[in-house]
């Protein structure tokens, strides 16, 4: 619109210039005509003057010729007077011509002599003077006629040139004006097209668009605006917000308008309007409108209808809430499942261990060992499911503690020693001599990966060997990158199954699952555990030739040494390790109470059993003192967390507390430490591990036998 307005000004300016130059051309031509007319008239006057002189000379000559034809009679006074009068008139007519004045003087002298007495000399003198004057005047006549003709030609030429020049200039201006008119028509046509397009956009867009003047009156609104305020467009144009919406909304709109005018820049806000189908949510952007000179002329607004997006966000929030609830339910289910499975497993495994410590025949011992192996297999399945849940939730913690790599490998080797010997296999473990003795990282997760990989190798190898190698690939001043290789001579993995071997719930085949069991989570968990520690894993295998797993992990080190018995006592005999120690056990499950009672009394301890946290507090409030408290976490009446908080903050007791739980969920260990517990164990537990934990908490007050 601004360019069209500027184009119109230019067009009017060109028309004004055209009129001005047209008037100037007419004035110039008129002036030239007037000037040449004056010159022609002046030349014509002189030509007429010359004719008058010639006429007077001819008149004198005629008088003289008439006189001579009468044989020159004496001159009468009338004749003399007439001749004198003619000469005076001739003198007057030639007054501006010095040459002719001389001839007039000669003529006057000749006439004077003639009047004195006619003679041939006097007549000849008059005749000569008249001839001289006639010749002069004829020459002047020719000259003045030529000048008159020249002036007329010049006048005509100037007139023609002026007309041609004016015509040419006017023609050029008309051509330019015609071009401008064409351009203007094109611009107007384009402007109309743009206006149609703009109106189409305004009427068909889902955005609310409006323009107000400085008084707050609506100047332009589109269809969507009218729909939102539920009024017709004709009832909106020229009116203020107070005439269209509620007073509160109008006041809010006025305040925002004033803020936009003060700031001089766009302002974005979200607004809600009641609509026939419910609230309409708009994301409104108001901005100042300026003219071509930068002067403020109004306020514009564009509001996007975000009702669907708001509803989607609300649905997304609801879905997220449901997902969180589902996740909470899932965690609760896993906690309950873990508790309900681990609690009887703890009883089965513990009682089996106690049974194995009694006098049994070989068949009975084999039965008991079979029970223990079955419990361990079931425990692997439960641990895999829980670890999978932790990894999926991103809540699996990675430790950074110092440990001896040799201790981890020795522990793994000892764990599988019985099964390896029973199958008649060879389990070889080799550590690169350049590997630092003490590393800094997570020994528990390394142990978990090695147990899983070596367990798989043992499961799928019927004869031959299993080899574990550790090589130091790259070593810096405080970091070492280790490569672990676990190879076997077992049945191998089909080539088609290798790309999927690390997927969740994936095994080499259905027959493998039926023959060897397992959940298919082990390798997937291994890969994710290694990735959490910045490592990777790969596999190479050929059917009937064996399988090789390799993974890489980086560990810190400081060239320090560590006593292999650091932190715990190496107990060869637990029969007297708890002598003289009073231990309070809070456990709601009767089988587990009996199991813990047997285990602790076997170590020489004095045991007090209670079934929940409230009973434990009652015993402590009675003034009973204990060297150690073993606290189950999930108990009726009062759980272990609440009981521990009361012990620490109300009873102000510092007695060591070991948490014992069957859930083993994400964040539970941290919650135990935050509530004031000193250590944490999961069910089912190994007797030796429990003794070691107790030893670590009560050292140096325990006498160790053996």
Image (cartoon, rainbow, N blue to C red):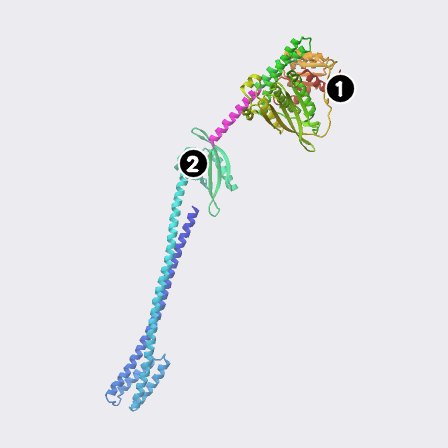
Q: Which residues are magenta?
A: 306-331
Residue 312 on the magenta segment: yes
When asked about the image quadrant of residue 90, the answer is: bottom left
- Residue 272 x, y percent position in the rendering: 48, 32
- Residue 616 x, y percent position in the rendering: 67, 14
Q: Which residue occupies the foreground of this view, 256 or 289?
A: 289
Query: Pointers 1 and 2 in contact (CB under 8 A)?
Result: no
Left or right? Give the position of 154 relative to 581: left
Q: Residue at x 54, y 22 (%)?
A: 326
Q: Magenta-highlighted stretch: main secondary structure? A: helix
- Residue 367 x, y percent position in the rendering: 63, 10
Q: Residue at x 33, y 78 (%)?
A: 139
Left or right? Give the position of 4 relative to 427: left
**Disc ID at residue 205:** 2
Within 10 Å of disc 2 (Cα), the crowding (few <14, some 14-19, many 20+) is some
Q: Which of the marked residues, 1 or 2, is nearer the chain's N terminus?
A: 2
Left or right? Give the position of 376 relative to 152: right
Judge whether 545 appears above or below 107 on screen.
above
- Residue 334 x, y percent position in the rendering: 58, 19
Q: Secondary structure at mark 2?
A: loop
Image quarter hosting the C terminus: top right
Judge whether 449 appears above or below 18 on screen.
above
In the picture of the structure, the residue carrying the numbered disc 1 is 700
When asked about the image quadrant of residue 603, the answer is: top right
Instruction: Please say whether residue 313 is visible from this viewpoint.
Output: yes
Q: Secondary structure at mark 1?
A: loop
Residue 209 on the magenta segment: no
Q: Residue at x 46, y 37 (%)?
A: 302
């Amino acid at each position: 619109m601004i360019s069209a307005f500027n184009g119109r000004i230019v067009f009017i300016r060109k028309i004004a210039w055209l009129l001005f130059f047209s008037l100037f051309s007419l004035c110039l031509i008129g002036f030239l005509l007037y000037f040449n007319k004056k010159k022609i008239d002046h030349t014509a006057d002189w030509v007429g003057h010359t004719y008058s002189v010639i006429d007077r000379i001819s008149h004198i000559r005629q008088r003289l010729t008439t006189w001579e034809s009468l044989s020159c009679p004496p001159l009468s006074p009338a004749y003399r007077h007439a001749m004198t009068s003619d000469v005076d008139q001739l003198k007057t007519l030639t007054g501006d011509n010095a040459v002719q004045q001389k001839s007039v003087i000669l003529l006057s002298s000749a006439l004077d002599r003639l009047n004195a007495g006619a003679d041939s000399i006097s007549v000849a003198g008059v005749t000569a003077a008249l001839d001289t004057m006639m010749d002069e005047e004829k020459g002047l006549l020719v000259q003045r006629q030529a000048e008159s003709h020249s002036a007329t030609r010049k006048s005509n030429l100037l007139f023609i040139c002026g007309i041609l020049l004016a015509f040419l200039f006017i023609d050029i201006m008309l051509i330019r004006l015609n071009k401008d008119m064409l351009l203007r028509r094109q611009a107007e046509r384009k402007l109309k097209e743009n206006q149609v397009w703009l109106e189409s956009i305004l009427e068909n867009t889902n955005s609310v668009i409006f323009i107000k003047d400085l008084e707050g009156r609506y100047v332009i609104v589109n269809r969507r605006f009218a729909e939102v305020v539920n009024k017709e467009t004709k009832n909106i144009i020229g009116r203020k917000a107070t005439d269209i919406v509620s007073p509160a909304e109008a006041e809010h709109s006025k305040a925002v308008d004033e803020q936009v005018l003060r700031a001089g820049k766009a302002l974005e806000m979200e607004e809600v309007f009641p609509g026939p189908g419910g609230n309409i949510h708009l994301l409104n952007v108001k901005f100042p409108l300026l003219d071509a000179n930068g002067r403020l002329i109004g306020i514009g607004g564009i509001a996007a209808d975000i009702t669907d997006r708001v509803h989607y966000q609300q649905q997304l929030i609801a879905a997220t809430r449901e997902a969180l609830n589902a996740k909470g339910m899932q965690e609760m289910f896993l906690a309950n499942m873990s508790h309900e499975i681990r609690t009887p497993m703890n009883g089965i495994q513990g009682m089996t261990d106690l049974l194995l410590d009694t006098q049994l025949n070989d068949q009975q011992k084999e039965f008991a060992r079979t029970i223990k192996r079955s419990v361990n297999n079931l425990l692997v399945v439960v641990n895999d499911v829980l670890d999978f849940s932790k990894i999926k939730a991103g809540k699996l913690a990675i430790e950074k503690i110092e440990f001896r790599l040799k201790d981890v490998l020795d522990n793994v080797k000892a764990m599988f020693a019985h099964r390896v010997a029973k199958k008649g296999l060879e389990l070889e473990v080799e550590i690169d001599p350049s590997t630092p003795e003490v590393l800094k990282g997570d020994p528990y997760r390394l142990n978990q990966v090695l147990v899983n990989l070596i367990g798989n190798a043992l499961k799928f190898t019927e004869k031959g060997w299993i080899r574990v190698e550790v090589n130091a690939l790259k070593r810096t001043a405080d970091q070492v990158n280790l490569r672990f290789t676990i190879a076997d001579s077992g049945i191998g993995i089909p080539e088609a199954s290798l790309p999927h071997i690390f997927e969740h719930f994936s095994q080499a085949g259905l027959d493998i699952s039926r023959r060897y069991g397992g959940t298919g989570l082990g390798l997937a968990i291994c890969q994710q555990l290694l990735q959490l520690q910045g490592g990777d894993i790969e596999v190479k295998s050929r059917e009937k030739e064996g399988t090789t797993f390799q993974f890489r992990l980086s560990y810190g080190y400081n060239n320090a040494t560590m006593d292999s018995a650091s932190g715990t006592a190496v107990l060869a005999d637990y029969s007297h390790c708890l002598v003289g120690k009073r231990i309070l056990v809070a456990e709601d499950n009767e089988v587990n109470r009996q199991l813990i009672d047997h285990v602790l009394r076997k170590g020489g301890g004095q045991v007090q059993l209670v079934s929940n946290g409230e009973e434990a507090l009652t015993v402590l409030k009675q003034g009973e003192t204990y060297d150690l408290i073993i606290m189950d976490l999930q108990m009726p009446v009062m759980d272990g967390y609440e009981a521990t908080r009361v012990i620490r903050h109300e009873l102000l007791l510092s007695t060591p507390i070991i948490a014992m739980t069957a859930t083993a969920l994400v964040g539970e260990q941290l919650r135990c430490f935050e509530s004031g517990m000193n250590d944490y164990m999961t069910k089912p537990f190994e007797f030796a591990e429990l003794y070691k934990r107790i030893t670590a908490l009560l050292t140096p007050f325990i006498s160790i036998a053996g």
